[in-house]
Amino acid sequence: MFAYILRRLLYAIPILIGVNLLTFALFFVVNTPDDMARLQLGAKHVTPEAIERWKVEHGYDKPLLLNTRVTGSAQLTDTLFFKRSAAMFAFEFGKGDDGRDIGNEIRTRMGPSLAIALPVFVVGLLVNITFALLMVFFRATYLDVWGVVLCVVLMSISGLFYIIAGQYFIAKLWNLLPISGYTGGIHGLKFILLPVLVSVVAGIGSGSRWYRTIFLEEIGKDYVRTARAKGLSEIRVLFRHVLKNGMIPILTGAVVVLPLLFMGSLITESFFGIPGLGSYTIDAIQAQDFSVVRAMVFLGSFLYIVGLILTDISYSWVDPRVRLQ
Amino acid sequence: MVRIGAILLRMGLLGMGVGLLAGCSDSWNNPYPGADAHANVLYSAFSERPKHLDPARSYSSNEAEFTGQIYEPPLQYHFLKRPYTLIPLTAEAVPTPHYLDAAGKPLADDAPADAIAESVYEIRIRPGIRYQPHPAFARDAAGHYRYHALDAAAVASKRQIGDFTHTGTRELVAADYVYQIKRLANPRLSSPIFGLMSEHIVGLKALGDTLEKVSMAHPDAELDLNDFPLAGAEVVDRYTYRIHIKGKYPQFIYWLAMPFFAPVPWEADAFYAQPGMADNNLTLDWQPVGTGPYYLSENDPNRRMVLTKNPYYHGETYPEDGDVADRQAGLLADAGKPLPFVDKAVFSLEKETIPYWSKFLQGYYDSSGISSDSFDQAVQFSAGGDPRLTDSMREKGIHLVTAVAASIWYVGFNMLDPVVGGQGEDRRKLRQAISIAFDYDEFISIFLNGRGIPAQGPIPPGLFGYVDGVAGLNPYVYETHDGKIVRHSIEMAKKLLAEAGYPNGRNVKTGEPLVLYFDTMASGPDTKSRLDWMKKQLDKLNVQLVVRGTDYNRFQDKMRKGNAQLFEWGWNADYPDPENFFFLLYGPNKKVATGGENAANYDNPEFNRLFERMKDMDNGPERQQVITAMLEIVRRDAPWIFAYYPKSFGLRHDWVHNVKPNLMANNTLKYRRIDPDLRAARRAEWNRPALWPIMLLVGGVVALIAPAVVAWRRRERTTA
């Protein structure tokens, strides 16, 4: 297994280079370094000299991909792409255009992102699986039918609606929780409850339907019939046998997103004032801060690759028939 | 069934417990610690985290909200007086420049501008002003700086300024002001006004060039600005300094009220330049050091920023001179009392308008703007068109504060364009016709909820040169009818269009329909109705308008290259002088030719000549006369459709006092006074938790579970 993981990690390097190159190309097709300088220097009294000085100070004065002013390997290494990319593989992200250290920001913001994303993930998974199993348990009854209808209704509503409705009813009308904000420690619990509740409810529709489909597929299999024939109760059949066998597709969806929980949620963090990585990314895109955007895309890609490796490992853990070679 | 009953009982008890808890503690939705309920703290919000707090770099209004309270330039605007009046802040008096000729000989105060080679501003600051507590000033028993020789390992554990045990202070001296002026030339700071100031301050450009060379040669070495002299800024004595300005530039006095010219102690730069500081975001750009009434005690721009009263503040008293309206509004109730009133100001990051508005209504923010979403909930217009608060707002004791901004929005014609540009009579009439067709009175009503005033020229209200009422109308677009100012009829616009060579919207020579192109940064579904409205305005003339929505970068690029035909843009005043608006139309500032701020590329020699005369004049009848002549030229030439002067609407709770919009000053926090007890009472009253939804939820869960349980038991029995 170790060799497998090592091989997968080595595969990740060209993927990450590719992602980085693509991000670089897309970003600089839309924004030139001059544009970035103007945005940073403000709209007033910006002279061409000031733009040049800003570019020099921030290292944006170099050619993008190929430096024809020098010779040898420097043609590739003395470029904006290389200078900005090489250090990232050592997770040295440098500074954003606002002068703040990106690594420091990521470390600081990871906590708030996780504070929301982790409970949403765990509680959401539990709620969705439970609800799905209930629908399967009461399959072909009015409870199942109305459960599916409810799921479809929940799925059809925009995520933004849940946020606005949650804030309006729970925080504004009923005064039960703060409408937005964040603080660390135990005092932060009251700020986390609402976004977690809203995010869990928003995810019930799609999650439960997906898991219901998985469980329904399992429940028609021979081993379930055998279990029933042995006289096991339906609860025991569902929770001991069907749930365990349904874990593989569940893991596919769940484990892969596990590392990405660090990246936070763009909209939820913005609406609830959570100072996480999601809002950091959105801010960077709006501010055209290439350094931060590139770092976040790189980090996201890396975590996604880690998630895929973890998924593979979890397969072999859940299903002994799966072997990693 | 017994077990389920027990579970339900427990849930009920839990609900009751929650209810009891509600009765015992403060409001559940209170985002602040309950212990602060009666504290003398002002609560506000910011929607975008500041990029820069270094006074050499900061230029945005959202940054000025902080830097204005921390840094003290020599001058400030009087809080109450209108028109805006400069008064001393740290200076002993508002300086009057004295003039020198090319040989360095003094000239009379009324010397002609072209004879003046240099203007010298001598500023004397008040002794005894001290900086906020900061580790950069901390000294040990031997008098050495405690924190000026740290290595990266020692800094590694310091994440905030509060992590340094010792702090110190020192007296403000004139050299700190000179040091900051030099910082404007530091290439590593990329000050946004360096380009502009290097045209005015003697030797600043040369200093910038020198520093750039040194910086390039020694990229890792710290630039000690004390080693580099600046001819245009000199220390006369401990409390006096002089600034030398090239020629005559009367508007420079306004810059002395901006944080760009606030003092920065060299110790701060030396402290933050140490290894490891920047890696922990410990820089002057994020941890300011000033002499103002507040200092930044907590700086988490991702969550909240806290300004705390500076214990070393030199003291200032609330202004005693205001007009009758100020007295009637209670704005002189605190006259003569020491400032600042508020102990602490907490600014929370609030990116979205909905939570911001809701928290304001709950009493968790002391004041608020009004977004379009909540406008109808807050404001209604009387039959006379005057805005007033809705009943629900008045019942809460909320007050409305309005002010016309020192800004203008306009639609510009690119004067280099072969269709709409140029000085020919036909082009002029075309622009005048289009100016009439764009009904900005309607625009303000539909899209701004009345938050604007139709513009009659480039100078907004509140600035010298603006003339109100009939005397100040733009006769090329408006006329009077029964004593009221109304827009010219569309028939008149059609007549002008025909005279311009486009009868009924078609080229008289070719018969081709007139198609115009409008470039805007506005794009997306939100702006569609607004852009449709613009097309509709030209439909009235049978002229087609093609809207070219683009992003900010592309728009700027088009403007620089002169590729736009019609475009919309705006301008906020840097200072309250008509020069700051007329220079947007000054020929030598053409954007295409010089990269200046004249985006319309308008260039009228007569206007240019008058501008050069006007900019050096003191306010008075003679200057007004010149301004009137300039207004006549730009109104006739119509390089802009003068759209509107935006009007800001703000709300405050009745526990907030001393609020008067001052669109020039950014240091008004020190005047605010709050009544924390009234606020605490209102918050408690407005935020009682409603427990019935919890009970309903419990009941709903029971109602859902019960039939499921019954069905499950029935099925179990069947299976058995």
Image: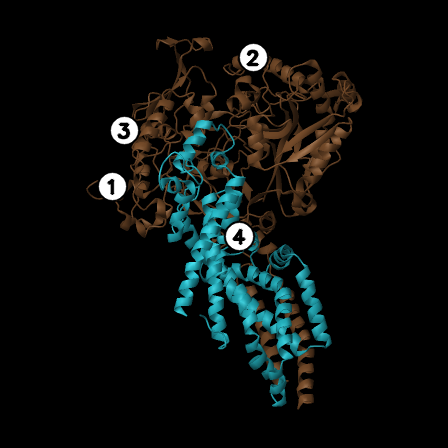
Q: Amino acid at mark 4?
A: Gly
Q: Which residue is mark 4?
A: A273
> Disc 3 versus disc 1: distance between alpha carbons?
20 Å
> Is residue B482 depicted above or below A310 in this figure?
above
Q: Which callout, 3 or 1, points to the residue nearer the camera?
A: 3
Quickly name the residue at label 2: B610
Mark 3 or 1 closer to N-term?
1
**Amino acid type of disc 3?**
Asp
Task: Identify the mark at residue B222; answer none if there is no mark.
Answer: none
Colour scheme = by chain
Q: Nearer the viewer, mark 3 or mark 4?
A: 3
Q: CA distance from mark 4 to mark 1?
A: 40 Å
| Residue holding disc 1 | B145
Q: Residues within 10 Å of mark 3 (few under 14, many from 20)?
A: few
Image quadrant containing the C terminus of chain B: bottom right
Whether discs 3 and 2 lie on one chain: the answer is yes
Nearest to viewer (mark 2 / mark 1)? 2
Q: Earlier in the sequence, mark 3 or mark 2?
A: 3
Frontmost residue, B565 versus B103: B565
Label 1 sits on a secondary structure element that is loop
- Disc 2: CA contacts within 10 A as few (<14), some (14-19) or many (>=20): some
